């Protein structure tokens, strides 16, 4: 067998470079001393081999030429491989400073803190999500989300606390407790409402938070007019009872309800006015209402009603208005309120009445009722439906409790 001298020489040169490199790549034995890392050399002094591979092969495989080592020798070669110094541990993202620490802090990222130290000393980390303050005074469309948007779980309840769809503050036919004194055409009159509006069954929140969920309830009231100058004789009374089914959260509420209303003249009034025509005014009505709270204390609402059974009147009625009143707890000092309501009815050629109220109000919690003291101005057709075609104007003072 003949050996070619140049080939033998090339193999010997390759072995002279490759074998020591392979030995360096092997893990050291237990008793061997660790090999000290050697600084990387310049690109021009690296030679023909990258470890045990020829350099041209490494470049073809995409590794390319290694960059020159930085002046501080932070990048070193250990057995022909790049090694970085160990990284410092990351600090907590939202670590709070000690009481005696300076106000300015650096970013906690060690990769940005070094070269940008001068700039970072004026930058503090963002607070954690739970540290972001949430307003609670109702200033803004979704302001007071801590009080408007409840995080309470939904569950089934019998006789729950509070109403999802609250009564209209200036609505004259709402089921509530009311006492209103006024003078109309020289007569001192007293309008009373003795009633209530309660929930029977709810799937929603419980407790003192603003009620949310689905609810079915019961409402009813006797609405009476007394003649104070005539020994508080009864002029007339309207009776109302209904079943509201409501859904809503702290911002938007919907109501679908049924109610029956009938109006009756008082016996004393008929005795004093023997020729006065007695009307059998009644209606069984379906109602579809919507209510929205742009803020915790401000409300806009509207509803449409259609009487499926009625006597004397006609089917359609419309009601809309605005309420501004405390939606949360007021404490003993209370807070001001104002309300406007318009009630239009088909039997009056879509005329009706308008009511303005203002005064002071108290509420124990977002789920409790609202107690009010104030003034009222009423203008339009009489809200006692036995006199539904009479025009009246009433100015007086009253107290109200809305459930």
Image (spheres, rainbow, N blue to C red):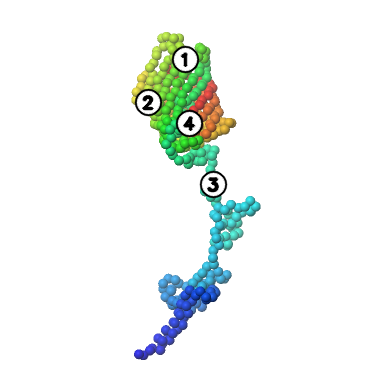
Total label count?
Answer: 4
Residue under pointer 3: 132
- Observer-side mark, 1 or 4, equals 1
Mark 1 and mark 4 lie on one chain; the one further toward the N terminus is: 1
| Location of the N terminus (image quadrant) | bottom left
Residue 304 percent across, percent down from the top left: 39, 29
Percent position of residue 352, x then y: 43, 23
- Which residue is label 4 attached to? 322
Which residue is most to the front? Answer: 31
Residue hosting label 2: 285
Left or right position of 118 against 218: right
* Mark with earlier residue (1, 2): 1
Q: Residue at x 54, y 65 (%)?
A: 86
Task: Compute the Cα span from label 3 to label 1.
Answer: 59 Å
Q: Secondary structure at mark 1?
A: strand
Badge number at residue 290: none
Q: Position of residue 98 (x, y in %)?
A: 62, 52
Callout 3–callout 2 Cβ contact below 8 Å:
no
Name the residue tied to disc 1. Answer: 234
């Amino acid at each position: 067998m003949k050996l070619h001298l140049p080939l033998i020489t090339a193999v010997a040169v390759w072995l002279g470079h490759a074998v020591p490199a392979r030995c360096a790549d092997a893990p050291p034995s237990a008793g061997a001393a660790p090999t000290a890392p050697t600084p990387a050399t310049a690109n021009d002094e690296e030679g023909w081999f990258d470890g045990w591979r020829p350099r041209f092969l490494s470049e073809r495989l995409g590794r390319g030429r290694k960059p020159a080592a930085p002046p501080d020798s932070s990048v070193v070669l250990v057995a022909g491989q790049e090694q970085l110094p160990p990284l410092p541990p990351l600090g907590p993202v939202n670590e709070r400073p000690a009481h005696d620490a300076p106000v300015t802090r650096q970013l906690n990222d060690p990769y940005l803190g070094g070269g940008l130290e001068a700039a970072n000393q004026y930058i503090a980390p963002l607070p954690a999500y739970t540290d972001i303050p949430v307003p609670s005074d109702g200033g803004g469309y979704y302001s007071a989300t801590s009080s408007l948007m409840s995080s309470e779980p939904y569950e089934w309840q019998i006789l729950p606390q509070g109403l999802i769809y609250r009564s209209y503050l200036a609505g004259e036919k709402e089921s509530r407790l009311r006492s209103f004194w006024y003078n109309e055409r020289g007569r001192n009159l007293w309008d009373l409402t003795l009633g209530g509006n309660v929930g029977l069954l709810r799937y929603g929140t419980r407790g003192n938070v603003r009620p949310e969920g689905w609810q079915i309830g019961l409402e009813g009231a006797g609405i009476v007019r007394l003649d104070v100058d005539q020994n508080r004789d009864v002029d007339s009374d309207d009776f109302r009872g209904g079943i509201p089914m409501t859904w809503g959260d702290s911002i938007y509420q919907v109501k679908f309800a049924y109610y029956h209303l009938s109006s009756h003249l008082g016996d004393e009034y008929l005795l004093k006015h023997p020729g006065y025509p007695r009307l059998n005014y009644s209606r069984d009505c379906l109602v579809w209402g919507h209510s929205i709270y742009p803020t915790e204390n401000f409300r806009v609402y509207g509803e449409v009603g259609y009487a499926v059974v009625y006597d004397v009147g006609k089917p359609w009625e419309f009601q809309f208005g605005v309420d501004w009143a405390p939606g949360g707890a007021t404490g003993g000092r209370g807070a001001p309120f104002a309300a406007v309501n318009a009630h239009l009815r088909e039997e009056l050629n879509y005329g009706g009445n308008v009511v303005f109220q203002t005064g002071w109000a108290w509420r124990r919690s977002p789920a409790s009722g609202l107690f009010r003291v104030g003034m009222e101005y009423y203008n339009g057709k009489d809200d006692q439906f036995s006199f539904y075609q009479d025009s009246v104007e009433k100015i007086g003072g009253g107290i109200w409790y809305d459930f």
